[in-house]
Amino acid sequence: MRFTAMNRGQRGKLAMAAAALSVGLLALTGCGYINAQQTSHQYAASDGIRADVGPVQLRNMLVVSTGENEPGRVIGAIYNSSSKDVKVTLKGAEGSQTEVSVKKNSYTLLNDSTDPATLSTTGGKPGTLVDVQVSEDGTNVNKDVKMPVVDGTLKEYQKYLPAGSTPTGTPTPSETATHGESTTAPSEGH
């Protein structure tokens, strides 16, 4: 076997190529080393929260209301991983509560295709978190969760406002009247 000696120029080029390769590999893998992977931990990717109560899993849960002492509709998804039907009770402020039935190994979406799950009093202004106690009828498991309260400012939540509620930021009839128009009926006899 014959070995040839490298001249100084060849060794320099080889060292520069190895250094460039090392820097390139470090740049490509360095981001993964410094930053945590988003897929490695669970989080709520919406406005709502997530919580687990025994075999019941709450996903994207939130309350839609116009005010602290106003009714609030609970929306989101409730999953039941047990082999029997369950009834989930959501208790809010001042004794307000609502119940949701969920079939075994299934889920119930609290949206516009289901009966509203409404708390008679929200207990928090839009933009705050309210305490809601969640319990499942088959176990003695209760869990207090903090659910966000939103109002009808965002168009996608307007349809979930409880009946008779006016979304925050919605103009009243007097605010929509143009110059010279009256919002009251003219009085007779003048």
Image (spheres, grey):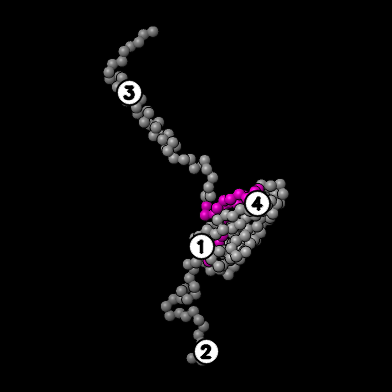
- The secondary structure making up most of the magenta span is strand
Residue 126, labelled with which disc? Answer: 1
Disc 2 and disc 1 in contact, CB within 8 angstroms: no
Residue placed furthest toward the bottom = 189
Amino acid carrying label 3: it is Ala
Front-lying residue, 124 or 4: 124
Mark 2 or mark 4, which is nearer to you? 4
Residue sitting at 65 percent across and 57 percent down? 89
Amino acid carrying label 4: it is Val
Label 2, on which residue?
A: 188
Q: For marks 2 and 1, give the CA distance.
A: 42 Å
Q: For marks 3 and 1, give the CA distance.
A: 63 Å
Where residue 115 sits in the image (x, y, percent)?
65, 61
Label 4, on which residue?
A: 141
Compared with residue 182, is residue 81 higher up or lower down, i.e. above or below? above
- Name the quadrant of the N terminus: top left
Which element carries disc 2, helix, strand or loop? loop
Residue placed furthest toward the left = 8
Amino acid carrying label 1: it is Pro
Labels 1 and 4: the sequence-earlier one = 1
Label 3, on which residue?
A: 15
Labels 3 and 1: the sequence-earlier one = 3
Residue 174, labelled with which disc? Answer: none
